[in-house]
Image (tube, grey):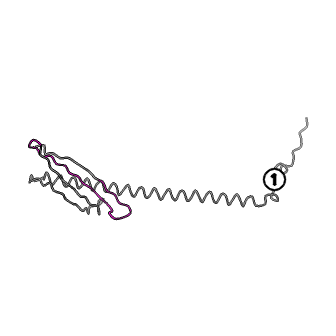
């Protein structure tokens, strides 16, 4: 019952001895740098696409609000607050207010009389950043009827 003497620990890992490595660490380092560079390039590309997607979403939302504003302005012309005569005509709007500055809305209006009741159909097309690489167009259609 005697303990066996331990072997020399370096003999078990003799292949790791500095004399036998002969540039293995250089190859591993080069491999690691290439992998990290590829990951960094992928992250930069992903970040760029995300920024572009966010910008397009903002412009698209602005175009939607421009179209909605055009439809509401046209509805106010059809049913004026002061009770004046209804005006159903095509109209273009250029916006300068914050949020929709630089956007436009082109509205078309059509009227139909059914059983003595006027029904209006308004189509509004909002557009932002026209002529630029990132642009958006949104269309809204509403139908209106005077309930009085």
- When the figure is inspected, residue 94 is found, relative to residue 75, above or below; the finding is below
Q: Which residues are magenta?
A: 114-138
- Give the quarter of the image for residue 93: bottom left
Residue 57, x across and y down, in percent: 38, 55
**Residue at position x 11%, y 46% in the image:** 113
- When the figure is inspected, residue 116 is found, relative to residue 129, above or below; the finding is above
Q: Residue furthest right?
A: 2
Crowd class of label 1 (few under 14; some 14 to 19; many from 20; radius 10 Å):
few
**Residue at position x 52%, y 59% in the image:** 44
Q: Choose between 33 and 12: the one closer to the eye.
A: 33
Q: Residue furthest top?
A: 1
Q: The N terminus appears in which quarter of the rendering?
A: top right
**Residue at position x 61%, y 58% in the image:** 36
* Helix, strand or loop for the magenta stretch, by majority: strand
18 relative position to 104: left or right: right
Q: Choose between 132 and 43: the one closer to the eye.
A: 132
Dot 1 corresponds to which residue? Answer: 15
């Amino acid at each position: 019952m005697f303990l066996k003497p331990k072997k020399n620990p370096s003999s078990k890992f003799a292949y790791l001895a500095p004399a036998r490595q002969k540039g293995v660490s250089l190859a591993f380092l080069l491999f690691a740098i290439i992998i990290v560079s590829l990951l960094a390039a992928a992250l930069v590309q992903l970040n760029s696409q995300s920024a572009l997607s966010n910008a397009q979403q903002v412009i698209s939302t602005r175009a939607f609000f421009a179209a909605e504003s055009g439809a509401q302005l046209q509805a106010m012309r059809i049913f004026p607050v002061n009770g004046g005569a209804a005006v159903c005509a095509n109209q273009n709007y250029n916006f300068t207010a914050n949020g929709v500055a630089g956007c436009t809305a082109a509205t078309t209006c059509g009227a139909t009389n059914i059983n003595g009741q006027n029904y209006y159909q308004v189509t509004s097309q909002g557009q932002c950043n026209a002529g630029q690489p990132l642009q958006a167009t949104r269309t809204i259609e509403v139908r209106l009827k005077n309930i009085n």
